[in-house]
Image (cartoon, helix red, strand yellow):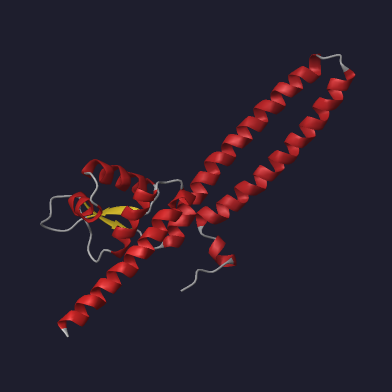
């Protein structure tokens, strides 16, 4: 009987490890390494908050790597620091609301990239307007006017994208596509 229990636990651990490997493999979608993905998986399946030492032991990685990984996951709002009376070391838990993590991470990234694109489009338009006002080359003037139209189209798209990002960041997306329970 004890042998069966042992095999059942072993099978359980293998199954969870396989899923953690899948999480780790797919973390590049979030722009992080698979080792950070493994860290998140270990924290996600942990029954109790973990210290950096606990994580180091579980993953057999350096404490520095654990610290860097936790900081990265914390910045992504996928891990948070927690407190437990009587324990002086920092404790960490995973954010278990993956919807929240997604909206925070992707909303923030999309916003930064889109704002950068808007700035670049504005600068390009400003530069093209300067050339347009000084050139006497009619073919170049026509080309600049077409390019400015294209940049206006891009800016209109970015304006729409910023509205979409707002829907993601505020959680209004769940009014249109409800979270699965």
> Whole-percent x and y of residue 175?
56, 66
Query: Which residue does the image show at 34% across and 49% down from the upper left?
Result: 35
Query: Which residue does the image show at 46% across and 49% down from the upper left?
Result: 28
| Picture quadrant where residue 92 is located | bottom left
Above or below, 62 against 81 in this view is: above
Question: As drawn, which residue projects farthest toward the bottom?
Answer: 1
Above or below, 51 against 63 in this view is: below
> Whole-percent x and y of residue 70?
30, 48
| Residue nearest the observer in this picture, 110 or 57 | 57
Query: Which residue does the image show at 80% across and 14% down from the upper left?
Result: 134
Above or below, 133 against 177 in this view is: above
Query: Which residue does the image show at 57% across and 67% down from the upper left?
Result: 177
| Picture quadrant where residue 8 is located | bottom left
- Left or right, 46 with respect to 101, comes to left
| Residue nearest the observer in this picture, 162 or 109 | 109
- Left or right, 156 with respect to 33, comes to right
Q: Is residue 96 visible?
A: no
């Amino acid at each position: 009987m004890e042998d069966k229990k042992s095999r059942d636990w072993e099978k359980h651990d293998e199954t969870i490890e396989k899923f953690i490997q899948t999480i780790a493999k797919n973390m590049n979608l979030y722009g992080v390494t698979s080792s950070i993905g493994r860290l998140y998986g270990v924290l996600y399946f942990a029954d109790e908050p973990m210290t950096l030492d606990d994580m180091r032991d579980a993953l057999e990685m350096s404490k520095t790597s654990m610290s860097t990984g936790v900081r990265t996951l914390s910045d992504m709002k996928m891990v948070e620091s927690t407190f437990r009376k009587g324990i002086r070391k920092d404790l960490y838990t995973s954010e278990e609301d993956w919807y929240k993590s997604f909206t925070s991470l992707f909303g923030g990234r999309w916003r930064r990239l889109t704002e950068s694109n808007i700035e670049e489009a504005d600068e390009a338009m400003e530069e093209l307007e300067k050339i347009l006002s000084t050139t006497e080359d009619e073919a170049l003037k026509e080309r600049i006017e077409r390019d400015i139209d294209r940049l206006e189209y891009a800016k209109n798209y970015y304006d729409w994208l910023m509205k979409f990002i707002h829907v993601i960041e505020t959680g209004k997306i769940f009014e249109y596509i409800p979270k699965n329970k």
